[in-house]
């Protein structure tokens, strides 16, 4: 029996702690015999990683920023994500289009209408069904109070262009994620990222067990200490 591909994205404001769970989840799926591709945005291909470098370091106007984000996403979808899904792999992507609506849209105040248009042209025509707009099957949204996230980030490495933004920016980004979640409640799973790391993992794995995507024992064996 061939397995169908599964596309999961991980979202949240900077400092919410999403990245640390991706490798753990990849191992839990691999223990089930699944092929797993872990990737990220901006980036995920040689071309898109070059664009990431520009996005995180060079100043530019909001439309340029949005166009670069979607250019990288198109390349990522065509050359990595879609082929992996076609092979039946599990694709775990650290951020995807919800981040664009949250950061460029809510954070920067860029037109949501234009972002929706770009989303449609960049994400359609890559799948076998020509009219399908490719989106994650499931999105884990790590929700954390922006003030707590800022405190966590202040102990981390030198901030990039986004991480250097003020608290008000991240409050808008957080609001942007809430809006996206409200628009797609069947796709979004909210996790309380204020909890301890192992508790956040428990929330995440319980959802996957409930959805029949991981068996209880496999999920437990992948738990972080
Ligand atoms: P991030 O996952 O935080 O990378 P790292 O953990 O290495 O810092 O992503 C980098 C930044 O890019 C993050 O601040 C959010 C921003 N971003 C956008 O502004 N728009 C997007 O569409 C995406 C995917 C990310």
Image: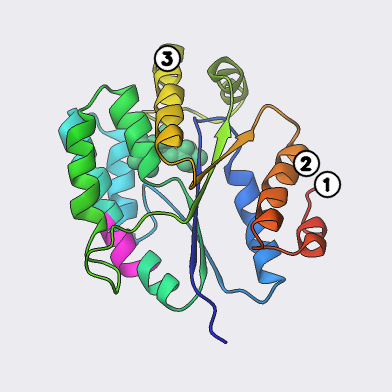
State the mark number for residue 66: none
Pointer 2 or 1: first along the chain: 2
| Foreground disc of the pair 2, 1 | 2
User: Which residue: 43% across, 54% down?
Assistant: 136
User: Could you say where residue 147 lies in the image, as x and y percent from the top left?
Assistant: 57, 15
1 and 3 marks in contact (CB < 8 Å): no
User: Which residue: 34% across, 23% down?
Assistant: 107
2 and 1 marks in contact (CB < 8 Å): yes
Q: Is residue 69 magenta?
A: no
Q: CA distance from mark 2 to mark 3?
A: 29 Å
Tell me the quadrant of the picture where the N terminus can be found: bottom right
Tag 3's secondary structure? loop
Q: Is any atom of residue 20 visible in this view?
A: yes
Stretch in magenta: 74-80
Q: CA distance from mark 2 to mark 1?
A: 7 Å
Using the image, determine if residue 91 lies above or below residue 93: below
State the mark number for residue 198: 2
The 10 Å Cα crowd at callout 1, few under 14, some 14 to 19, many 20 or more, is few
Q: Main secondary structure of the magenta part?
A: helix
Pointer 1 or 3: first along the chain: 3
State the mark number for residue 166: 3
């Amino acid at each position: 029996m061939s397995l169908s591909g599964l596309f999961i994205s991980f979202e949240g404001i900077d400092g919410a702690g999403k990245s640390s769970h991706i490798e753990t989840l990849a191992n839990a799926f691999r223990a089930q015999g699944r092929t797993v591709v872990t990737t990220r945005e901006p980036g995920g291909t040689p071309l898109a990683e070059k664009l990431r470098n520009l996005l995180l370091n060079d100043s530019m106007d909001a439309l340029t920023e949005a166009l670069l984000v979607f250019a990288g996403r198109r390349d990522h979808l065509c050359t990595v994500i879609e082929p992996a899904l076609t092979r039946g792999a599990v694709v775990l992507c650290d951020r995807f289009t919800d981040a664009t609506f949250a950061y460029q849209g809510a954070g920067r105040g860029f037109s949501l209408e234009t972002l929706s248009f770009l989303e449609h042209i960049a994400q359609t025509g890559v799948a076998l069904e020509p009219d399908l707009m490719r989106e994650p099957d499931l999105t884990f949204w790590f929700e954390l109070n922006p003030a707590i996230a800022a405190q966590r980030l202040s102990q981390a490495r030198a901030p990039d262009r986004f991480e250097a933004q003020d608290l008000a920016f991240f409050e808008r980004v957080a609001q942007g994620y809430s809006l996206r979640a409200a628009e797609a409640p069947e796709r979004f799973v909210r996790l309380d990222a204020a909890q301890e790391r192992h508790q956040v993992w428990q929330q995440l794995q319980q959802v996957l067990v409930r959805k029949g995507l991981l068996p209880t024992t496999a999920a437990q064996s992948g738990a972080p200490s």
